[in-house]
Amino acid sequence: MADAGAEFDHPIFCESLRLIRDLPGTAAALAALGTLQQDVLLRLIHSSGDPELAGHLRFGPGACEAALAALAAGAPILTDTAMAAAAVAPMAGRTFGNQVRSVLDWAPERAPAGSTRTAAGMAAALAALRPGVVLIGSAPTALEVLLELVAAKTVPAPALVIGMPVGFVGVAQSKRHLAESGLVHIRLEGSKGGAGLVAAACNALLRSAWLQAASAPSPLIS
């Protein structure tokens, strides 16, 4: 594992990160963050091509550190979409072998009255899987269910929630509720988000955890 960083860092990827650091405003945003947080932001900008994400990204206290501990321990990862699960599974397989599942694996064929398939699947998945890290990039209803169940102590709190649902209906409210919940989390303010972004954030954390386990410095930061 001594050269673990070489597994992840293609020269084109590293050059992209160098260019991102030179973008107007990005250097200041990076300077305000810790190394692990910088890794997440760089990966988000690299994945989306949107440097404005720097102004929307928020980290709860100890979020990255909690994630690294859970991921390195092999904690299951739960996502709200099959797309996010498919994007995270290869990195999980190359690192700690974490189980990666979508709430849709537990969702009913039809949405319950007044709810959504994703929300119903979230409730069932939390009880069955007991995930360490939960990724929400699409469904604010799933995020609300998670918050309600944890607040009611029906399920244990995950080590980390990455809350980045995208859109306009119920999205800002769900993110505000996450910010007020006391859960350890990473979120994107406003309407920005999506499956690709939550997957990118999780992959950045998996990568950092793997490099930390290998005692290798992160080449993302110059």
Image (cartoon, rainbow, N blue to C red):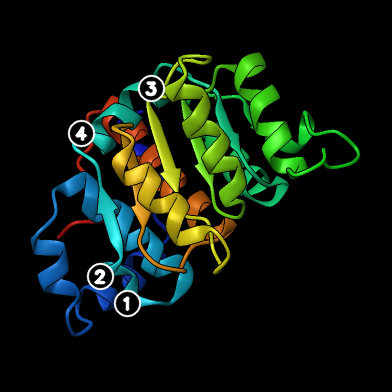
Q: CA distance from mark 1 to mark 3?
A: 29 Å
Residue 10 figure quarter: bottom left
Q: Between residues 92 and 159, which one lies in front from this camera angle? A: 159
Q: Earlier in the sequence, mark 2 or mark 4?
A: 2
Circles 2 and 4, Cβ within 8 Å, touching? The answer is: no
Label 2 neighbourhood size at 10 Å, few (<14), some (14-19), many (20+)?
Answer: few
Q: Nearer the viewer, mark 3 or mark 4?
A: 4
Q: CA distance from mark 1 to mark 4?
A: 23 Å
Please give the label number shown on residue 55.
2
Mark 4 sits on what residue? Answer: 62
Whether 152 is drawn above or below 190: the answer is: above
Residue 154 at x, y = what percent?
53, 14
Q: Earlier in the sequence, mark 1 or mark 4?
A: 1
Q: Nearer the viewer, mark 1 or mark 3?
A: 1
Secondary structure at badge 3 equals: helix
Mark 1 sits on what residue? Answer: 52
Secondary structure at badge 4 equals: loop
Q: Between residues 46 and 122, which one lies in front from this camera angle? A: 122
User: From the image, which quarter does the N terminus lie in?
Assistant: top left
Q: CA distance from mark 2 to mark 1?
A: 6 Å
Which amino acid, mark 3?
Ala
Which amino acid, mark 4?
Gly
Please give the label number shown on residue 212.
none
Q: Is residue 156 left or right of residue 92?
A: left
